[in-house]
Amino acid sequence: MDITAPQFRNRFIHTRYQALRKCCGCIHLRVGAGISCLIWMGLSMYFAILSFQNKSPFYSYMTSAPLIVYGVVNLLLALNGFFGMLALFRNRWFYVRLFSHATWTVLFMVLVDGFANAIYFITQRDEFMSWCINSSADTLNSAANVTGTSLRGNDYYNCDRLFQAEIKFGLFSTVLMIVLYVYWGACIYSFSHKQGASAVTGQRLAAEMGMMPPPGTAGVPPPPMHPIGGGGPGRSNIIVLNNEKPQSKKFSFKSLRRNHTIDVSNDNNNQSQGKQLKRKSVPDIIFDDFISPTLHHHHHQQRRRSTDI
């Protein structure tokens, strides 16, 4: 049975929303999941490398502890994308479902950590201003060879405007990641649900149509066939399944009628057989009684004539 046939394809509708039937409304869910895995593998690996180098992909300054945590969760997301490519290549419901569960777990960790980093950066304004002014002053002093005049302590470098801009950029990037990552995760879950619905519906249809049993279950053996016409007393033992030889090779309506009479009652069968034997034997007895005296008298007359001569 082809479960992808047109008469079965419409039964696999798993959601009412068109955006989750196709990735981005026009791409097959399997292809869309593969594209999202490639993006996660590249982007998350880049974020992880920057974080392990004590550099934030969104902010100019941040302490090392949040960066290490962010690098670890992005590395997990990159590995999950690699596992997703293998699961989509196998295209088995078990692997796709496992990939969907792992994706939602890692996405939760990445998005929560990214949002926590944005809040942490907002609370560290004084440290950011101090770092920005000092680093900018050192760079300018070394470049201009300024002597005797200190440029530290004053915001000559628009550090406050830089801080406001990085807050906006960080929040916008975090919100965009939440929207895209959650949507891609929903598409992966939708594809997993579609695979499961197709598998379960196909097994149910196969079971209803009397075809192969569902995978993983042992088939139920058919009940044994009873022999046709057992050898009862007083009946013709024409039994094919028991390998018994029939009494006669010729077919007659008389024997068929006799077998039908035997099935009604065994006693009637014995009586009918006795009547049939009696009917067959009576003409023979009468014939013998009627013919034998005539033949004897004729033979006696011939002997008498021969004696007179």
Image (tube, rainbow, N blue to C red):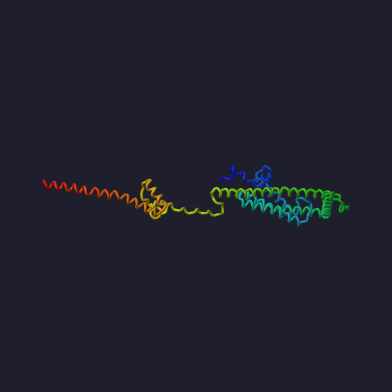
Report the residue that reaches farthest toward the right.
148
In this rendered view, identify the residue nearer to me: 110 or 38: 110
The answer to whether residue 182 shows anywhere in this view is yes
Q: Report whether 126 appears left or right of 270.
A: right
User: Whole-percent x and y of residue 143?
Assistant: 83, 49
Q: Report whether 143 appears left or right of 222.
A: right
The answer to which quarter of the image holds residue 63 is: bottom right
In the rendered image, the quadrant that contains the C terminus is: top left
Number of labelled discs? 0
In this rendered view, identify the residue nearer to me: 200 or 20: 200
Q: Report whether 142 appears left or right of 290.
A: right
User: Whole-percent x and y of residue 25?
Assistant: 68, 43
The answer to whether residue 79 shows anywhere in this view is no
Q: Residue at x 39, y 48 (%)?
A: 257
Report the residue that reaches farthest toward the left.
309
In this rendered view, identify the residue nearer to me: 45 or 188: 188
User: Whole-percent x and y of residue 160?
Assistant: 84, 50
